[in-house]
Image (tube, grey):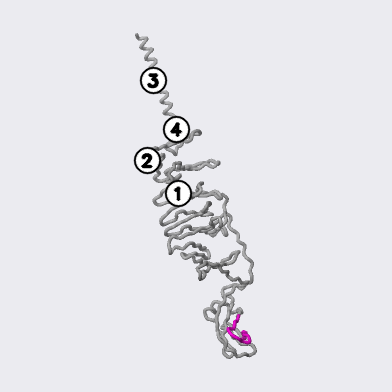
Amino acid sequence: MIQRWYRTNRVFLVGLIAVGFAVAISSFGVVRAEHAKPNSSVSYSCNTGSACVEGSSTGTGTWGVYGVGSKDDGVRGVTTTSSGGNGVTGMATGSSTSGSGVYGKALHGDGVYGSSSGQNQSGVYGQNTSTYGFGIYGSSPNAYGVYGTGYWGVYGKGLYGVYGASSSSYGVFGEGPGDVGVYGTGLYGVSAESRAAGYDALLATADYTSTAIFYGHNTANSSFCNIDQDANLTCTGKISGSSRVEVQHTTSENRHVLAYASESATPTIEDLGAARMRDGVANVEIPSDFASVIDRSNAYYVFLTPMGDTRGLYVSTQNAGGFQVRENMRGRSNVEFQYRVIAVPRDAKNVRLPSAPAIKPPQLPRR
């Protein structure tokens, strides 16, 4: 009886000791795991499987992973790989169009903020692989929908490189820093297809009758170019091009036709008028408004057209204030004539057929 009791209790004691030893080893492993990184409350390390830490939610209004930081980041992701891994990756694989891969919201700061120090890399890079969609879409009622700063503030590539719409401010606002010279372009657009294919390098629209369609400004020299709400173009600089200037007109049959602007080897301005001969002589005064814009130190040209039978007309004298017209062979006609005066503008450089400047577009980063 005593011997049986001893054998039974010996087995119980050995089992109890084994269980206690296992619990001790398990507790040591937990403590060791929790204190693997001194700066972390809990740390996990793995080299196999899909994730070291995984959160799964199947309920509505319940997050898979939720992080809160009262003085720093709520959730932070860091990668040290050189093979193209991401610090944080967000994916929406559902069929709903309202699901976002990454969603950011802020009460006073930036909803999503991205920063990069890599050469020709992006602070925020967005890509849409569907036929029609936005790489990056931003919406704001009173501020910027998308705001970018850097060597290229915003770089877009797609059916529309950059598309912006605003109800009260700028659809697209671009500012080029002055320290990068020719590459500091405020707004630059490139279209890989011809215009006939329907692709525009830059597309600007306005939704209000008082909103300008396009406005470009260089703060270094106060130069600007503006297309107002009525599509009137105003620029402080010269308008140059490799083709002719065409102007659209409407005929009496309400048909639209194109007229071509005349070209000159030197900058000129002209005025038209009419006068009448008295006993074969007419003194014509140049109108004050026209005289105020011409260079009076340069000679101007006068072309005459008599409106009746004469022996011929010629300009006998001319000065800064006007010119005198006489009839040939001391004729004494009282005929009316028309005249055309061509002069040099006072603010123009009288250069004949200057060399055309080379137009070199800025180099864009490869993607």
Mark 2 to mark 3 CA distance (whole Å): 46 Å
Q: Position of residue 345 (x, y in %)?
A: 57, 75
Query: In this picture, is 345 found above or below 244?
Result: below
| Image quadrant where one finds the N terminus | top left
Mark 4 to mark 3 CA distance (whole Å): 26 Å
Which one is earlier in the sequence, the residue at label 1 or at label 3? 3
Which one is earlier in the sequence, the residue at label 2 or at label 3? 3
Element under disc 3: helix
- Closer mark to the observer between disc 1 and disc 4: 1
Label at residue 60: 2
In this orientation, which residue lies closer to the viewer: 59 or 219? 59
Is residue 194 rendered magenta in the image? no
Label at residue 112: 1
In this orientation, which residue lies closer to the viewer: 162 or 18? 162
Label at residue 16: 3
Mark 2 to mark 4 CA distance (whole Å): 33 Å
Q: Residue furthest front?
A: 253
Element under disc 2: loop
Which one is earlier in the sequence, the residue at label 1 or at label 2? 2
Q: Which residues are magenta?
A: 303-316
Mark 1 to mark 3 CA distance (whole Å): 57 Å
Query: Three-letter amino acid code at disc 3?
Result: Leu
Element under disc 1: loop
Q: Residue furthest top?
A: 1
Query: In this picture, is 313 found above or below 187?
Result: below
Is residue 125 in view from this perspective?
Answer: no
Query: Three-letter amino acid code at disc 1?
Result: Val
- Closer mark to the observer between disc 2 and disc 3: 2
Label at residue 33: 4
Residue at 42 percent across and 24 percent down: it is: 22
